[in-house]
Amino acid sequence: MTSIPQELRDRELWSAFFTNTRRSYRFMMRQDWFGLSMLALLILFVVGPMVNVFIWAFTERAGRYP
Amino acid sequence: MPVMSSIIGRVQFVWNKLNLTPYLLVAPPILIMVLLIIYPASLSIFDSFTVTDLETGTAFVSLENYYDFFEVPIARQNLWYTITTTLVTVFLMFVVCFPVSYYLRFSKGPVSNMVQVLALFPMFVPAIITSYALIRYLGERGWLDRILQSATGWGGFPAPYPGTEAIVIGLIWEGLPITVLILTAGLTQVSDGLIESARDVGANWFQVFFTIILPLMRRPVLIVLTLNFLSVFGAFTIPFVLGDAAPQMLGPYMARLYTSSQVSKVQVMAVVMFIISSAVGFLYVRAIVSEQREGGLTS
């Protein structure tokens, strides 16, 4: 019985992990592309300005301008 | 003691006979409305139709205040600007929010939950914070400009602030949660059974949408359009902070005239706004009443 070197085994597992993750993400994208695109838009236009406010508030209090 | 108990008994008898409890229950809100809304509004309407002769001090009924108001080109321009901005905002708000509501109605899962949370989030942010957030986000060399520049290399982002576009974006941002809530509630009233039966007999999603969902959504859509019109038409903070100095929406314009002691013009403007809002409010009330009469959408 031939033994697979640890390094090679890790690399294969690592690559399998990425392949599976990519596959599942691709499936999710195909399944819910509308929701994901809406989520991206909401993140850009709702979370974006608010993150800006938080950073602005904290940095101004520290006496620095963002 | 017997005399006392007989008086109490008589009072109870009269009370039961008159059946005053419902009137007493509705009295406080009606009283508050009369004292804080109807009385001052009536005074304002009355004042807008009266002119005082400075020499004799006598007041007489006249349309002079209205002539004065509509003679000024800026006032006419601001009125027209408010109406057009409101209509554009209400339309765009519906275009943005309807797909979100449609998605929330027919999707279940983590993405739909996140979309719901983000869509309702602006409800908890005060308008003044929204305005400053949007100034720093949409303004020249703002975050959006920098994101676009670093992602695409495009540096010609036309900053919407200050201007009409910024007002429209701000008002859509502010009205997003309530619009999504009302539309989702309306879509929830469209029963799954109707959609499933249509699908069973071979209807595709477009047919389901145009022949079942859209006709049943007529009333919630009318309600959301009228409510949005009323809130956008009378908006103050966002148009004041994000808008140009001229033309102005009526909210900031009224505040400017009021601080410069042109009260008669403000009263005329208030009456004009009241008439327009009443016409739109009538549509809302009619939609609500007809819904109550018919007992909902699906029953």
Image: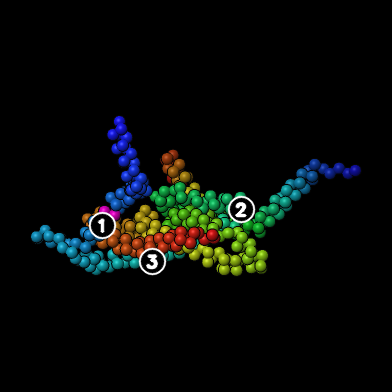
Distance from the alpha carbon under mark 3 to that under mark 2: 38 Å
Amino acid on which the number 1 mark rests in the picture: Ser
**Quick one: label 2, few (<14), some, or many (20+) residues within 10 Å?**
few
Name the residue beneath numbered marker 1: B42
In the rendered image, the quadrant that contains the N terminus of chain B is top left
On the image, which quarter does residue B13 sit in?
top left
Answer above or below: position of B209 versus B29. Answer: below
Q: Residue extending furthest right?
A: A1
Distance from the alpha carbon under mark 2 to that under mark 1: 50 Å
Q: Are marks 3 and 2 on the same chain?
A: yes
Instruction: Say which of B230 and B75 sits in front.
Output: B230
Answer above or below: position of B112 versus B3. Answer: below
Q: Residue extending furthest left?
A: B56
Amino acid on which the number 2 mark rests in the picture: Lys
Instruction: Say which of B134 and B293 sits in front.
Output: B293
Name the residue beneath numbered marker 2: B108
On the image, which quarter does residue B61 sit in?
bottom left
Distance from the alpha carbon under mark 3 to that under mark 1: 28 Å
